[in-house]
Amino acid sequence: MSAVEHPQSDANLVIDVEGLTKSFGTRKVVDNVNMQVARGEIYGFLGPNGSGKTTTIRLLCGLLTPDAGTGTCLGYDILTESPSIKLEVGYMTQKFSLYEDLSIRENLDFIARIYQLPDRRNAVDAAIEKLNLTARANQLAGTLSGGWKQRLALASCIMHKPKLLLLDEPTAGVDPKARREFWDEIHELADDGLTVLVSTHYMDEAERCHKICYLAYGQLLARGTADEVIAASNLQTWTVTAASQKHIHRLARDLTGRHGVDIVAPFGTVLHVSGTNEAALVQAISPYRSEAGLTWNQDEPTLEDVFILMMKQTPDNFQ
């Protein structure tokens, strides 16, 4: 699966790197990655656990030093000017990392002191208002729900007005309503010119990114818009519905491993049957097309179908 290239004007690039490589011990975690990210883009990183997503993001913004590779982030050299990069980056980790025994306001005041922001009180008030935290400003962080902790963490990341925002699986464990509200905030920030790098396992979140890339054990296998990545996969998908779950489960067992069938994935009462060789896939499913109780439709593959295919095709390099 080849990557989709998007030439950009150098003046519009926030990130422009080539040959990015990083190893820990004998294991190569990031392997010769090239990437360009434009100002105001929301760029999503997909891939299985241990695929190098977080390490790549940290290399891109100067939080880690690559073993090989060159490039710039925010106009600074990633090898020699990483301290300058860090001052203009906001980083939201997967795990809530603020003080649970301080209130929202106290946590934000602490962050403002770290960045030595002038007029701290106004900076804190502005962050509280922007993330709709006013009614809870004096509530202890440890008593907040996951969604409100997420808002507080985001407020702390943007107080110093960074030009690049890093989000490492930011909505893990957060309810769907809070996730949607969070992404609305991210799009507002991007509309104001903030560039966002986000790693996620949620396909609906990946589809909300302007562009995505798929990393598998250090190698960048695909990139582009969600539609471009789907098209580049050459995947064909049939969906099957049945009157009973037992029928679906039996069909899944029968089709798994057949020549031409690369993926068999149940989604509730619907079975997705996919393959990259259209003729072989049609031949594999043809004995079941006339079976009573089954309804077959040829559909567009989803991003999740492509994600599952790429996971199957890429062996784990953790040895």
Image (cartoon, rainbow, N blue to C red):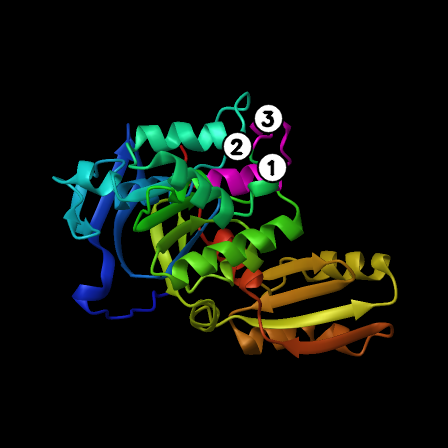
Question: What is the CA distance from the residue labelled 2 to the residue labelled 1?
Answer: 7 Å
Q: Viewer-proximal residue, 56 or 196?
A: 196
Per the image, is 151 magenta? yes
Q: Which mark is residue 104?
A: 2
The residue lying at 56 percent from left, 42 percent from top is 134
Circle 3 sits on which residue? 142
**Residue 236 versus residue 115 in the image, above or below:** below
Q: Left or right: where does residue 259 sit relative to residue 60? A: right
Where residue 120 sits, quadrant-wise, is: top left
Q: Left or right: where does residue 28 sit relative to residue 125? A: left
Query: Earlier along the polypeptide chain: callout 2 or callout 3?
Result: 2
Q: Where does the magenta region start and end?
A: 138-154
Q: Viewer-proximal residue, 210 or 278?
A: 210
* Label 3–label 1 contact, CB within 8 A: no
The answer to whether residue 150 shows anywhere in this view is yes
> Residue at the top extreme?
101
Residue type, mark 3 in image: Gly
Question: What is the CA distance from the residue labelled 3 to the residue labelled 1?
Answer: 12 Å
Per the image, is 9 magenta? no
Q: Position of residue 128 (x, y in %)?
A: 49, 42
SS class of the residue under badge 2? Answer: helix
Residue type, mark 2 in image: Ile
Q: Position of residue 57 (x, y in %)?
A: 33, 45
Circle 1 sits on which residue? 136
Q: Quadrant of the C terminus?
A: top left
* Label 2–label 1 contact, CB within 8 A: yes
